[in-house]
Image (tube, rainbow, N blue to C red):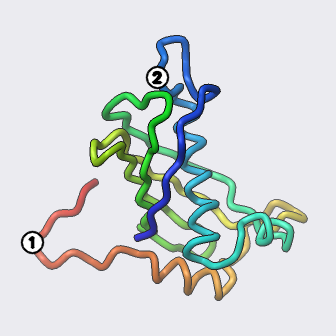
Amino acid sequence: MFKTSILVRFGDLDAAGIAYYPNLVNFLHEAFEDFFVGHVGRPYPEVFRDGIGFPTVKVEMEFVSPVHYGDHVDIDVTVEHLGRSSVRVRYEGSVQARPVFHARNTMVAVDMKDFRPTPLPEALRTSFLSAMEPAAPAGKATRP
């Protein structure tokens, strides 16, 4: 599992003074970019410039508790599933150990020249596999 932290800035807030939910969805992508730097060992913009992108095809997010101006949202990033060209990532957001959101994002690796799915490059596949949660023992449930 990879961990990162994102500071909630004034521009992230809504009229109620809490983080505006689309901005929290954007935090998922920011955490994914941090994952590339901190886990993959290659900045996402470099991968993007090399012609591989990861557009989202599905995102699910449950907001558990409000996020406020100045909070540091700690985000655990775990790869849940790897397909030929797809990756599903789970994000667990918290502020001072208080859960604030749970999310899943499914992305597809595409060739940026034609925006068509492309197999995950082997180096990325290997790195993503190393960020997968070990399978739960029989009889043990994992968080949905």
Residue farthest to the right, as pictured: 113
Q: Is residue 3 above or below residue 59?
A: below
Residue 128 placed where, x, y %?
53, 77
Left or right: where 111 falls relative to 84: right
- Between 9 and 3, the one nearer to me in the picture: 9
Residue 93 placed where, x, y %?
39, 47
Residue 84 placed where, x, y %?
59, 77
Residue 58 placed where, x, y %?
54, 48
The picture quadrant where one finds residue 133 is: bottom left
Left or right: where 4 falls relative to 23: left
Q: Earlier in the sequence, mark 2 or mark 1?
A: 2
Residue receiving disc 1: 139
At 37% from the left and 38% from the top, the residue drawn is 62
Q: Quadrant of the N terminus?
A: bottom left
- Identify which amino acid the numbered label 2 is placed on: Ile
Residue receiving disc 2: 18
Q: Is residue 44 above or below residue 132?
A: above
The picture quadrant where one finds residue 73 is: top left
Q: Residues within 10 Å of mark 1 (few under 14, many from 20)?
A: few
Q: CA distance from mark 2 to mark 1?
A: 39 Å
Q: Residues within 10 Å of mark 2 (few under 14, many from 20)?
A: some
At 46% from the left and 83% from the top, the residue drawn is 130
- Secondary structure found at label 1: loop
Q: Quadrant of the C terminus?
A: bottom left
Residue farthest to the left, as pictured: 139
Q: Is residue 108 above or below residue 9?
A: below
At 57% from the left and 72% from the top, the residue drawn is 38
